Image (cartoon, helix red, strand yellow):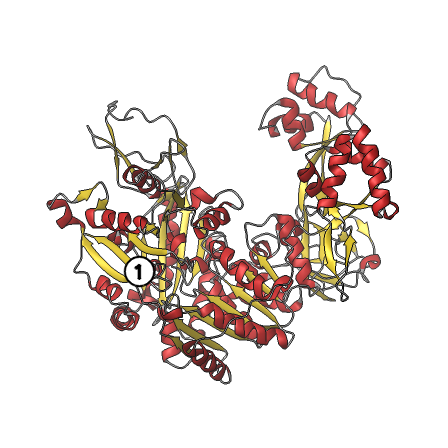
């Protein structure tokens, strides 16, 4: 068979998934010399297009040659053993079909960056170039001259030589003049961490030898003595059965030794040259290494009953919903179920909606299960993620704790999947594709592996609660708080009435400030919740009332006082110079509204002696930032914690007696059908942070609408009442869980093209769907990154057959759209949005 001019025999082919959003996978030929090396789940080096080199993943090996295009050969096999199992590939296939995306999108989301090799452009001199530089300009000359010294230069290296970011026009010109050529080189991203370990030469281990050594170094090399003394500091005592003790000179990592001694590399190297200390380099893990510890606890009567109920439900149901009020001890039940799974030599996946929750839970699980626990989420470096993946492949972890991306890990024998805080919107991936829901995907994954799934929440999603009510899911309840703690008292304060009585102090009611003062006097801690980051959402001109807007998006810029800048939370646009109104030139600018930064700032004025910290996305950007804040609050070094949704999610602080909700109205004013559900969940969850021990906590809830029915349900801690009321509205307006939704978003810099494309698709479905096709319509934010947005929402009966048929029809129509003059319009598909 001839492949692009090469003659060789091909009898075996591979369907390869590329890390690209392609409608279908491509088939590549397997050269004879590679046949014994290829296997499903291995990465292979392949060429796609004229020059680009990618690492693809073999999905299937077969004998069927494609008829509609000329195949290319696999260039090399990158793995000695498969890194993705067949069960994972089935999961990818289901996800691609369900969420209407490409398997390449799943591959991009699933594999750690260290496994995704990419093509790096490298420039080399043409062999025919005779070093005639007369036709080159100054910049071209610099590149060509550098290539005479160094055989290859990457794009980044050329940028540094020319002190320019944009070098492509220069390279293009050199290509046209036949001075250089471009080649592609595959770069392996993952590099194992190499550690240097120091140990004492056994010749010097006796007390006598060590004394002689000390005397010599004391006279001639005091810094070397410091290194040696620091090494001996790490020596520990090992107990013997007879009651005697033996000194054990264990190995110490070089970095720890240098940090302890403060003596520097030179002194350490001298001891190594003298053969007093021995250095050994080897590959080490990047992950925290925890010694096995065991934490025993007894379940309360209510917890034991709930655990028994869960096990009974698991006998006939694959999914069980655990509805446990805040601080009822759901984690203790999880630990008991994890113990049982591990005893059966099964794996456990413990999902949390955000990495923000992992810090406290990691500590609890590692105290119980030690090294059996692995942690996986997007904040880990690419090396750490590869390392966890490989450890799981080789069976080193029995428990994985992680955010939604942990679903893609290579599990072989999972016995239990726990989805904690299953209601949380953070389980939904919004961008990029795959736009999957972690909870729903976890349920499918559990069914694929024939294992059990446990969903836990104090405020379950309406879908899960309805499934439990219908008997599709099993159901268990925890109605009592752990340790006889009471649910907090919730007090609603009317900020309009407080303003009339002049009892508002900036954005704080007098009642809230009094309660904060009282809690601090008792040496108790306070959480203040405001679900908007930044200092203030608006910067407005007092003269013409113009609001500072983002030039790229149809949204206002948020003022961040700490960085002294206006910032767009959609595209990241920043503006530092805002001393004058750009419309009228007035310097009278007012800050309107408030975010977490402003709340923190004002609390420091009201309570100057209190230690106040902020917990939001801006405050935790650095790796470990979240853990530091949580640790200091847990140790009671922080007295008042101001935060966004992060403070609502499952955190357990025994000394928090007061929670302040700054603006309940904002929580109830979302622009989608889940507005009431999310508002109830957020307020109930943050209220649950108060009074988690013996003393009853208090929640001050500020609102301008105290008569709201939703607030009455929050006030009474009445999830059942809220569910009964809300489910009626969902049924009347045919929204989930009574229907299923698919949302199409059309994007283009030309508004007319966006509308034309949306209308073309809507026209196809209008007759069959009628009022169940919503749009075309502009979303609340109708321009982002200079692209106009128009949306279509499909509402359909939840029957799997009807949903599958509509998905196929939507996909076919989008393929047709991609073939006409509107193909430049970008269309994103979101199944089960919101």
Q: Residue at x 27, y 50 (%)?
A: 518
Image quadrant where one finds the N terminus: bottom right
The picture places residue 234, in percent across and down from the top left corner, at 71, 47
Task: Tell me if residue 784 comes above or below residue 58 in the rendering.
Answer: above
Rendering quarter of residue 724: bottom left
Q: Is residue 619 left or right of residue 591?
A: right
Residue at the spot of label 1: 697
Q: Which element is circle 1 on? A: loop
Q: Nearer the viewer, residue 784 or 470?
A: 470
- How packed mark 1 is, by other alpha carbons closer than 10 Å (few <14, some 14-19, many 20 or more), is many
Q: Is residue 145 left or right of residue 272?
A: left
Q: Is residue 639 left or right of residue 369?
A: left
Residue 473 seen: no
Q: Residue at x 23, y 48 (%)?
A: 514
Task: Tell me if residue 266 comes above or below residue 493 in the rendering.
Answer: above
Q: Is residue 685 left or right of residue 105?
A: left
Q: How many marks?
A: 1
Q: Nearer the viewer, residue 658 or 618?
A: 658
Q: Nearer the viewer, residue 526 or 496?
A: 526
Residue 832 seen: yes
Rendering quarter of residue 464: bottom left
Task: Tell me if residue 427 comes above or below residue 55 in the rendering.
Answer: below
Residue at far top of view: 134
């Amino acid at each position: 068979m001839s492949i692009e001019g090469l003659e060789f025999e091909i009898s075996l082919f591979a369907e390869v998934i590329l890390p690209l959003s392609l409608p279908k996978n491509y088939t590549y030929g397997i050269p004879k010399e590679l046949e014994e090396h290829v296997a499903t789940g291995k990465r292979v080096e392949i060429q796609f297009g004229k020059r680009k080199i990618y690492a693809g993943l073999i999905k299937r090996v077969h004998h069927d040659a494609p008829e509609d295009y000329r195949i290319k050969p696999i260039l090399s096999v990158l793995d000695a053993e498969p890194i993705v199992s067949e069960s994972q590939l089935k999961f990818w296939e289901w996800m691609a079909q369900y969420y209407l995306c490409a398997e390449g999108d799943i591959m991009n989301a699933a594999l750690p960056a260290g496994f995704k090799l990419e093509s790096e452009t490298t420039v080399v001199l043409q062999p025919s170039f005779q070093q005639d530089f007369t036709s080159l300009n100054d910049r071209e000359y610099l590149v060509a001259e550098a290539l005479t010294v160094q055989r290859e230069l990457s794009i980044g290296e050329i940028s540094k030589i020319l002190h320019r970011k944009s070098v492509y026009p220069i390279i293009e010109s050199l290509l046209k003049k036949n001075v250089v050529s471009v080649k592609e080189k595959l770069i392996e991203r993952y590099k194992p961490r190499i550690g240097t370990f120091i140990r004492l030469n056994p010749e010097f281990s006796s007390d006598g030898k060590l004394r002689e050594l000390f005397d010599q170094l004391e006279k001639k090399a005091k810094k070397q003595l410091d290194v040696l003394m620091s090494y001996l500091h790490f020596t520990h005592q090992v107990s013997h059965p007879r009651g005697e003790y033996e000194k054990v000179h264990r190995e110490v990592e070089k970095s720890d030794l240098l940090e302890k001694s403060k003596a520097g590399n030179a002194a350490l190297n001298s001891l190594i040259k003298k053969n007093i200390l021995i250095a050994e380099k080897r590959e080490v893990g990047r992950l925290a290494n925890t010694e096995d510890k065991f934490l025993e606890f007894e379940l309360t009567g209510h917890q034991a009953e709930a655990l028994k109920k869960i096990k009974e439900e698991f006998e006939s149901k694959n999914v069980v919903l655990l509805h446990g009020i805040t601080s009822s001890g759901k984690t203790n039940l999880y630990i008991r179920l994890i113990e049982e799974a591990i005893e059966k030599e099964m794996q456990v996946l413990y999902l949390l909606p955000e990495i923000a929750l992992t810090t406290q839970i990691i500590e609890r699980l590692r105290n119980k299960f030690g090294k059996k626990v692995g942690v996986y989420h997007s904040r880990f470096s690419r090396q750490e993620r590869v390392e966890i993946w490989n450890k799981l492949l080789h069976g080193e972890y029995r428990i994985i704790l992680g955010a939604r991306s942990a679903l893609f890990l290579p599990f072989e024998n999972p016995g239990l999947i726990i989805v904690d805080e299953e209601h949380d919107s953070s389980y939904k991936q919004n961008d990029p594709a795959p736009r999957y829901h972690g909870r729903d995907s976890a349920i499918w994954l559990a069914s694929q592996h024939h294992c059990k799934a446990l969903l836990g929440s104090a405020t379950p999603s309406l879908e899960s609660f309805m499934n439990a009510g219908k008997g599709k899911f099993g159901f268990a309840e925890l109605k009592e708080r752990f340790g006889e703690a009471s649910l907090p008292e919730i007090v609603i304060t009317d900020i309009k009435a407080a303003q009339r009585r002049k009892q508002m102090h900036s954005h704080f009611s007098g009642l809230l400030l009094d309660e904060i003062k009282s809690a601090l006097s008792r040496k108790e801690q306070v959480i203040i919740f405001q679900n908007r980051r930044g200092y203030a959402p608006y910067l407005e001109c007092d003269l013409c009332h113009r609001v500072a807007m983002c030039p790229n998006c149809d949204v206002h810029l948020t003022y961040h006082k700490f960085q002294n800048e206006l910032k767009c939370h959609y595209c990241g646009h920043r503006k530092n110079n805002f001393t004058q109104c750009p419309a009228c030139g007035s310097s009278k600018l007012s800050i309107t509204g408030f975010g977490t930064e402003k709340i923190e700032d004002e609390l420091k004025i009201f309570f100057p002696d209190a230690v106040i910290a902020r917990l939001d996305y801006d405050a935790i950007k650095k790796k470990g930032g979240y853990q530091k804040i949580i640790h200091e609050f847990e140790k009671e070094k922080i007295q008042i914690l101001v935060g966004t949704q992060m403070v609502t999610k499952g955190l357990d602080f025994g000394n928090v007696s007061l929670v302040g909700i700054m603006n309940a109205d904002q929580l109830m004013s979302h622009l989608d059908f889940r507005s009431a559900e999310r508002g109830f969940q957020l307020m109930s969850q943050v209220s649950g942070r108060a009074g988690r021990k013996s003393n009853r906590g208090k929640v001050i809830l500020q609102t301008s609408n105290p008569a709201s029915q939703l607030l009455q349900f929050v006030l009474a801690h009445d999830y059942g009442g809220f569910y009964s009321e809300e489910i009626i509205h969902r049924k009347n307006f045919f929204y989930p869980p009574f229907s299923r939704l698919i949302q199409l978003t059309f994007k283009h810099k030309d508004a007319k093209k966006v509308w034309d494309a949306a209308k073309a698709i809507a026209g196809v479905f209008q007759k069959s769907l009628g009022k169940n096709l919503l749009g075309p319509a502009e979303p609340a934010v109708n321009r982002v990154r200079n692209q106009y947005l128009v949306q279509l929402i499909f509402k359909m009966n939840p029957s799997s057959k009807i949903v599958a048929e509509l998905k196929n029809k939507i996909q076919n129509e989008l393929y047709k759209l991609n073939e006409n003059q509107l193909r430049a319009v970008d269309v994103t598909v979101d199944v089960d949005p919101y």
